Image (spheres, rainbow, N blue to C red):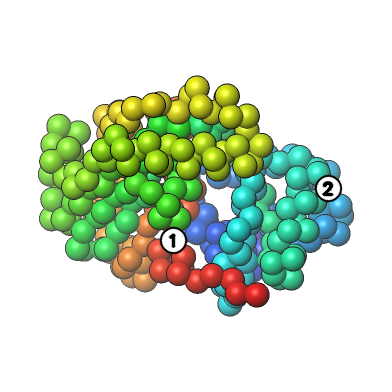
Amino acid sequence: MFNMNNPTDISKMREYYRTSDMLNLILYFPEVSPIIDLTIVEDVNDYYKNKTYLDTLELNRVDSLKTRGLITGIENSGFNDENKIVNLLNQIKEKDPLGVLVLFNTDIKSSKRYLRYAGISVGVDLGKSVYIDAVGRGFDGREVSKSICTHERYYIPWYKLRECTIENFSQFRTYLTNQSDYEKTRNERIKFLTSVGIPFEEVDSKIPMKYTPIPDFIWLDVIKNILKKLEKSEEILENDGFDSFAISGHTEGRKFTPWQMFDKGRYIKVLKK
């Protein structure tokens, strides 16, 4: 087991894709990261050895070493219980013997994933531009971080960041989904959510039939806590080698609460058996 609260574990945790992404967000954008108690459990034996502590962690992600391919094809609700953790660890080991399960808590109350206002990915070419992909109500960061679909896109030249406000934000929008395309993504979203055990009636009644653009109060939060800070942090990010990255996650309540800060090129890697 490795835990972010143990300084000697940090370097080892940074050898893993998603764990490293979460640590990056905590380091550079601590105001928006909800993640606490970030922990890696290596296998079933490790879980039972540290079960008392690990059972206090509510959420999970699958992860793998940066020297290996990303583990794909394992979907789950993201919430923990003992049977789920053991089952996930067994699935991970079938895909990659060195794969791990990342467990953590958040400092906010996690909502049901079909009740969120949006999933958002803020892509950054440092000093050049910011491009935003987003999905609306009932969706989350899964769709945008994995390039499954998008409902809204925005492009902001770097020199325009200082001028960007909620009053002119819509001027940067380059794409808004139409009803026909939205219905296809809605059907796929429902198919995914039911595949991880959420009843069809529950999600079908909550995900809107017609697309409504993401509310201004969400974009105001993104502008204040991400876009404005990017310009102020440009030199620090550049010195640390972050010239191209993305910040992605979903909303909780009226705020954007991203999970990770990653080099988008890493999603090209796929674990091959």
Q: Is residue 273 left or right of residue 205?
A: right
- Mark 1 surroundings: few (<14), some (14-19) or many (≥20) residues within 10 A: many
Amino acid residing under circle 1: Phe
**Where residue 129 appears, x then y in whole percent?**
21, 58
Please name the residue shown 30% across and 28% down the image. Answer: 212
Q: Write down the residue under mark 2.
A: 51
Residue 177 x, y percent position in the rendering: 27, 40
Q: Quadrant of residue 71?
A: bottom right
Spatial CA span between label 2 and label 1: 30 Å
The percent position of residue 179, horizontal first and vertical second, equals 29, 34
Kind of element beneath mark 2: helix
Q: Is residue 36 above or below residue 5?
A: above
Check the image and report above or below for 73 versus 270. above
Residue 224 visible in rendering: no
Of residues 74 and 263, which is closer to you in this image? 74
- SS under mark 1: strand
Between 135 and 61, the residue placed more toward the observer is 135
Task: Please name the amino acid that badge 2 sits on.
Answer: Lys
Q: Is residue 200 left or right of residue 85?
A: left
Front position in the image: 235 or 172: 172
> Image point 34% across, 46% down: which residue?
150
Of residue 163 and residue 266, the one placed in the foreground of this image is 266
* Left or right of 8 on screen, residue 267: left
User: Split into 4 quadrants, where in the image is the N terminus?
Assistant: bottom right
Decide: marks 2, 1 in contact (CB < 8 A)?
A: no
Q: Which residue is mark 1?
A: 262
Q: The C terminus appears in which quarter of the rendering? A: bottom right
Rendering coords of residue 246 (x, y %): 37, 57
- Total marks shown come to 2
